[in-house]
């Protein structure tokens, strides 16, 4: 009988071992476990994200690890949510098996703007917690909640769509292949500019809260005098004969809503000029090498022989009032009145001037 009892215990142990051999058969329990405890940052801390240092550390989250009733590896997920929403729509903002997580300015800003939909350059409260798990099928455990004030930023310039007769009167990117825009000089500014091919009536339309341009949003039209005065939700369309225009609009000149907006449009035709071109620098406007507007690529272009010993620039209307040179301030756009361009080697080039991206103007030269 004693031998049979020992044999029975051996068989029971063997069965028990085999039943736990695969992870799928393991049933985890959090009974008796303790959730993680966030220790940094402090509740109520303020984080102002730095647009000038995107890869620098914005915040380091530190927590005391969760304790479970069995020794096992623990995974942590840092979750964010708008304050006072009780994490009804939590955002997973990073996972780790460590007891800390580091965010750069760029990483936290992306979550704040793109997921939490915070308004750039405006402080807003968000809630943070750390969720711990120990395997498939385990019930997550949530830490204490820490509330933070976060001020995000944006590198995107505010824009106005320019729908009109030139493109079918449709401001929505979802409806048409291309919608022309004008852009402000910085976030919060109202001085918009851009280059648009116009042909008849047009208006300016702003985006809604989720960035969609559509009718029903605030728009601007002429005040009826056609003297350069804009009014919001005006019934009178602005108008231009067919051509390529330098378009400027200021929707709030005094930044207080007390004055009507203003706009100007200037017809432009672009050319390349300089000592690198066959005719050299301009003399009374007769030596510009005229470029042709390509409506398909939305670029001005010319195929021309360029000399490596010379330089060149772009200018409009055979005059220096509007001219583009090199990006001297490194903001990703050709500069008005910027420096002269050089040529890598002598030869025949396709030269393209792209003004379709407002305040992000560029040029390319391709050896043929």
Image (cartoon, grey):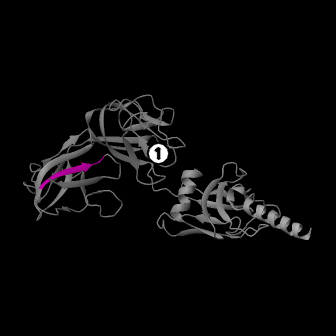
Residue 60 shows in this picture: no
- Residue at 44% across, 43% down: 251
- Residue at 19% across, 51% down: 351
Q: Which residue is mark 1?
A: 252
**Which image quadrant: the N terminus?**
bottom right
Q: Which residues are magenta?
A: 348-355
Classify 10 Å Cα crowding around label 1: few (below 14), some (14-19), many (20 and above).
some
Q: Specify whether residue 236 is painted magenta.
A: no
Q: Is residue 118 above or below residue 12?
A: above
Residue 282, position as x, y percentages in the image? 11, 54
Prevailing secondary structure of the magenta residues: strand
Left or right: 187 in relation to 17: left
Q: State the image quarter where residue 91 is shown.
A: bottom right
Left or right: 362 in relation to 112: left
In the current view of this chain or complex, which residue is farthest to the right? Answer: 1
- Residue at 55% across, 63% down: 49
Residue 128, position as x, y percentages in the image? 68, 60
Q: Give SS at disc 1.
A: loop
- Residue at 19% across, 56% down: 313
Residue 164, position as x, y percentages in the image? 37, 32
The front one of 254 and 301 is 301
């Amino acid at each position: 009988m004693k031998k049979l009892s020992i044999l029975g215990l051996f068989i029971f142990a063997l069965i028990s071992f085999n039943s736990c051999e695969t992870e799928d058969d393991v049933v985890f329990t959090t009974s008796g476990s303790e959730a993680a405890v966030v220790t940094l940052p402090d509740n109520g801390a303020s984080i102002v994200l730095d647009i000038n240092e995107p890869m620098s550390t914005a915040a380091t989250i530190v927590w005391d690890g969760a304790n479970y009733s069995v020794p096992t590896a623990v995974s942590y997920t840092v979750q964010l949510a708008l304050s006072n929403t009780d994490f009804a729509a939590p955002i997973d903002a990073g996972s780790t098996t460590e007891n800390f997580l580091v965010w750069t300015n760029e990483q936290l800003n992306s979550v704040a703007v793109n997921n939490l939909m915070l308004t750039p350059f405006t402080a807003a409260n968000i809630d943070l917690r750390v969720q711990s798990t120990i395997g498939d099928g385990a019930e997550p455990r949530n830490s204490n909640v820490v509330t933070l004030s976060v001020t995000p930023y944006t590198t995107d310039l505010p824009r106005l769509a320019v729908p009109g007769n030139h493109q079918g009167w449709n401001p929505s990117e979802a409806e048409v292949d291309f919608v022309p825009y004008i852009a402000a000089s910085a976030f919060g500014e109202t001085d918009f500019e851009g280059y648009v091919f116009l042909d008849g009536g047009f208006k300016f339309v702003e985006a809604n809260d989720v960035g969609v341009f559509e009718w029903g949003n605030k728009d601007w039209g002429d005040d009826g005098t056609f003297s350069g005065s804009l009014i919001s939700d005006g019934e009178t369309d602005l108008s231009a004969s067919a051509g390529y225009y330098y378009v400027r609009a200021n929707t709030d000149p005094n930044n207080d809503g007390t004055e009507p907006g203003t706009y100007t449009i200037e017809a432009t035709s672009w050319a390349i000029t300089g000592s690198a071109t066959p005719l050299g620098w301009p003399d009374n406007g007769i030596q510009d090498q005229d470029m042709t507007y390509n409506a398909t690529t939305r670029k001005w272009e010319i195929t021309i022989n360029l000399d490596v010993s010379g330089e060149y620039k772009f200018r409009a209307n055979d005059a220096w009032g509007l001219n583009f040179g090199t990006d001297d301030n490194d903001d990703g756009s050709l500069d008005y009145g910027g420096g002269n361009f050089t040529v890598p080697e002598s030869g025949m080039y396709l030269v393209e001037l792209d003004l379709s991206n407002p305040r992000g103007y560029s040029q390319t030269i391709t050896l043929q």
